[in-house]
Image: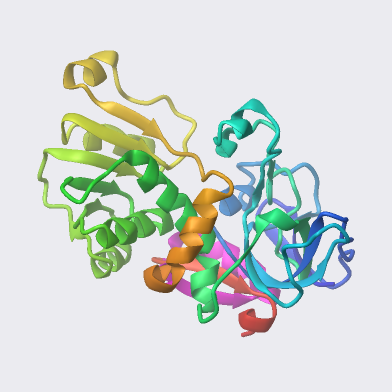
Amino acid sequence: MRAAVLMAPGRIVTVNDWPEPVCGPHEVIVEMDGVGLCGTDLAVFQGKRVPPATPWVMGHEGFGRIAAVGSDVRDRQVGRSVVIEPNYACLKCADCRTGLTSACPHRAIVGLDAPGVLAERVALPARFAHPVPDGLTAADLAAAEPYTVARAAVRRSGVTAADRCLVVGAGAQGLLVCLILSRLGIRPVVTEPHPQRLARAGRLGATPDDGRTGFTYVFETSGHAPALRPAVDRCAPGATVVLIGLNPHRIPLTTDDVVRRQLVLRGSMIYDHPSDFTTAITELPDARPGVVVEARFPLDEAQEAFTGAAERAGKTWIGIGGDGDM
């Protein structure tokens, strides 16, 4: 079986002899069509996040078709198109029981501490393989998981159509947040130094930054530490700041900043199982998140796909088979 395998930081090899997956009683085997790339994948590729071992199969934003179902699986069918929810929460701990599966301390994170899905076939728990409607493009499916991340952040924020929104960063997450806010009737302002990304945000209904202030919501998607403080300075009193991008640095704010201006800081981590994913999937035919996708590579060119992903204006994905054929 072919798979894209990290051999060392910065070096991915497409191998032809990776072991075939074994289907457990509560699992499905998915014949993969494609996998999107995101900042987490690039951090592993660059050596900023270290996998448990090498060689290591990369990727987590996968989609394909069910090729086999386990003996105890009753609600998934062979041949059905699915997208993978690549965070396998335990569904038993205190956080999972309250519905905050995104905080599950036991969740398996595909591509980080559980093997990735950049392979021709993968096994996974059946409940994390979500059936999708017919008629979606491969690009829409490649963007389905990050769309769910962005949608969960907007859901948690409490934003309404009357709010004034600033989106910091127009990478894939920023573009998807702009798309979702536009679908709510909001014309967000976006700040982004990359001109092609800025242009993409404009096509999704965003307005280029013109220096205005008084935002009631800020969505920080870049994970670039120096970008946060200038954005917060432009908030209206009582504004909500939603933090989506990750970075290891301390937040450049004081309690005076937050208390005197009565700001709300809201972190948003991935999504909660199963409602965020199932709801996002129902929106895919109308939302068409594939508009944020720019580049597609075959599995044999995984090294090139990863190497240039950070510089591309839109999202990169890798085709594997079926709908992902080049």
| Residue located at (35% from left, 59% from top) | 175
Instruction: Identify the image quadrant of residue 37.
Output: bottom right
Q: Is residue 295 left or right of residue 197?
A: right
Of 158 and 256, the residue lying toward us: 158
Q: Position of residue 6 (x, y in %)?
A: 73, 56
Total numbered badges shown on the rendered structure = 0
Quarter of the image with the N terminus in it? bottom right
Instruction: Specify whether residue 291 is painted magenta.
Output: yes
> Which residue is at a point 43% across and 65% down the rendered structure image?
283
In the rendered view of the protein, which quadrant contains the C terminus? bottom right
Residue 229 appears in the picture as rendered: yes
Residue 235 image-quadrant placement: top left
Residue in the image at 74% along x and 71% along y: 77
Residue at coordinates 37% horizontally, 35% vertically from top-left? 225
Question: Can you give x and y, in whole percent of width and height, for residue 4 in the image?
Answer: 73, 65
* Range drawn in magenta: 290-312
**Residue 291 in view, yes or no:** no
- Asked whether, in this view, residue 178 is left or right of residue 186, the answer is right
Q: Residue furthest front?
A: 74
Image position, residue 125 (x, y; %): 75, 54
Magenta segment, prevailing SS (helix, strand or loop): helix
Q: Is residue 298 magenta?
A: yes
Left or right of residue 179: residue 5: right
Q: Position of residue 269 (x, y in %)?
A: 49, 39
Q: Is residue 243 above or below residue 112?
A: above
Q: How is the image coloured?
A: rainbow
Q: Decide which of 7, 29 is in the foreground and name it.
A: 29
> In the depicted view, which residue is nearer to us: 155 or 306?
155
